[in-house]
Image (tube, rainbow, N blue to C red):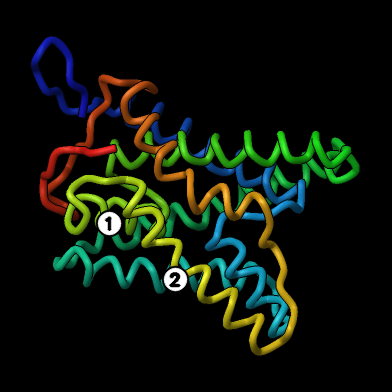
Amino acid sequence: MDHRNGQYYELTIRQFLFYFILSLTMDALGNGMSVSTNLGSAPWTAGSANLAKLTGWPIAIFLGLTSILVATANIFFARKLDWKRFFGNILFGVLFSFLAGVFTTLFNHLGIPGYPLWAKIIVDLIGLTTIGVGISIYQRVNVIMHPIDDLTNILRFSYFNGSAPKAQMSNFVVAILISLTCWLLSGTLVALNIGTAFAFFCQGSIIAWADRFVFPTLVHGNMDKSHKDIPMQN
């Protein structure tokens, strides 16, 4: 929804496509940057990586299963069944996984894994910040998004009085527990590093910042689809 001159306007198809393509690309781009540095992925990606390490199965299987399970959980947290939203979550997860793979391959070819440590840290933090901005955009459009980020949106407005940091950290706790469980079972831990800590503690604040300063006229729309309409907090 667009808010200009004190009036609210529904997004046009052109506006929706612009915001959707931009935010999806930013999310996948940021993840590609983060993964290529090998300095810690976002917690849910790290959870999938550790499950893959534990079982020997491809990480793509766990990324897909995560999308389906979280999309299902969103129905219960939102207390309503919206099939379009459910399958939209799955579609977004598929598109995101494909693009993230493309960007990861691109950055690997550009030689980022061989960068000095200080340079990889900068790339990793820029990537994770880019992810947060992308999430902010498609959460405000609130039509189709990754199920994990849809869960954050639901938690934010239905359970945490509009606080993005509290919602994001609560969301990430489950993912961190998955990685720690894998560590207890296997004795090894992968994909957890400085980037994971940065995402856990800072990504919610980045989302809240982007809500105010990146496309500031774009406000949370379709609130009735997933959560109560509660004013935002930092």
Q: Give the percent coordinates (x, y) of residue 229.
A: 11, 45
From what the image shows, is residue 95 above or below residue 56? above
Q: Kindly give the residue lying farthest to the bottom in the view shown.
A: 185
Between 98 and 189, the one nearer to me in the picture: 189
Which of the 4 image quarters holds residue 62? bottom right
Which numbered tag is attached to residue 174? 2
User: How crowded is the residue under tag 2: few (<14 C-alpha within 10 Å), some, or many (20+)?
Assistant: some
Between 149 and 115, the one nearer to me in the picture: 115
Q: Say which residue appears at 47% left-offset and 44% top-offset.
A: 203
Q: Is residue 198 left or right of residue 214?
A: right
Q: Give the percent coordinates (x, y) of residue 46.
A: 61, 64
Q: Secondary structure at mark 2?
A: helix
Q: Give the percent coordinates (x, y) of residue 202.
A: 48, 44
Mark 2 or mark 1, earlier in chain: 1
From what the image shows, is residue 22 above or below residue 183? above
Q: Is residue 124 left or right of residue 107?
A: left
Q: Amino acid at mark 1?
A: Arg
From what the image shows, is residue 101 above or below residue 181? above
Q: Quadrant of the N terminus?
A: top left
Which of the 4 image quarters holds residue 184? bottom right
Which of the 4 image quarters holds residue 85? bottom left
Q: Circle 1 sits on which residue?
A: 85
The mark lying in front, picked from 2 and 1, is 2
